[in-house]
Image: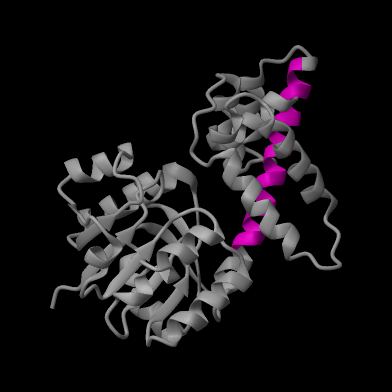
Amino acid sequence: MTKKIAFLGMGVMGAPMSLNLQKKGYQVTVWNRSAASPHLARVTAAGLSVAPAIATAVDDADYIFSCVSDVPDVKSVLLGEEGVIHDAKPNALIIDFSTIGKPAAREIAKTLKTKNLRFLDAPISGGDVGAENGTLTIMVGGDRPDFDEAKPYLEAMGKNIYYCGDTGSGQAVKMCNQVLCAIHMVALCEAIQLAQSQGLDPDLMIEVCQTGAAGSWAIANLGHKITARDFRPGFMVKHIIKDLRLVNESLSDLELPGVTLATQKFKDTAQLADALEQGTQAMFRSY
């Protein structure tokens, strides 16, 4: 029997992810808050069914994917007055790809369970490149049988699929991931600054250093974008600031000075014209 899939949130990540599901032969209905989104236009042109409302999208859906931005957005889409909780059929499996932190994931799962709805938190990493190529890393928290059931669908969108533990565990791993991403960006910007100060071609430095122990996703995918002054977003500055807010909220008595520095550098970047909507590589503008 063909399972019905709803995908809510046609942004820079959600749109290509839904298209990768389509390429694997899955039946997908999508919904987006803004009908004017160019990403929504893209999936429409590819032949995906576009629902006018969440209720229409999730009607009789077996799997409901969501990929939006912050905690309030996820709660609105899943739990709000017109949210999934009111119209999803009993026992539907809801999988959220947003980055919202462990406490929010647990709260959402608990609320959905009152309506006999299952939930997996499944934050993603890999940027727009990973979403386009179907090579995302997906970090999943929730009940193991639900993960096993969802895995074939997740494999249509990602290359590295990890079961991280009970509800919220995917979010916990994502917080660690964002710490690495943020601090790697500081390191990349400062290495480029150092290269320039010593009369080196920064593109040469990037080519050399990415092949050794200093290699990272940031240097390989964003290094040359910085030198080309290409700040188009794969992952926006405003989103990493949100994620670092979640990291800082989870610290309790733990001190992470690298996180403090990265947070400040991104906040400095956010003060520059148009930077909030630019990619994280725009941090270089603040140097």
Magenta residue span: 174-196
Q: Position of residue 281 (x, y in %)?
A: 60, 33
Where residue 225 sits, quadrant-wise, is: top right
In the image, 282 versus 36, the foreground residue is 36
At 60% from the left edge and 20% from the top edge, which residue is drawn? Answer: 227
The quarter of the image holding the C terminus is top right
Residue at far top of view: 199
Q: Position of residue 96 (x, y in %)?
A: 44, 66
Check residue 191 for magenta coloring.
yes
Q: Is residue 118 left or right of residue 255?
A: left
Where residue 285 sits, quadrant-wise, is: top right
At 57% from the left edge and 62% from the top edge, which residue is drawn? Answer: 100
At 34% from the left edge and 76% from the top edge, which residue is drawn? Answer: 86
Check residue 248 for magenta coloring.
no
In the image, 167 versus 228, the foreground residue is 167
Q: Is residue 3 left or right of residue 103?
A: left
Q: Position of residue 233 (x, y in %)?
A: 50, 35
At 74% from the left edge and 33% from the top edge, which residue is drawn? Answer: 268
Q: Main secondary structure of the magenta part?
A: helix
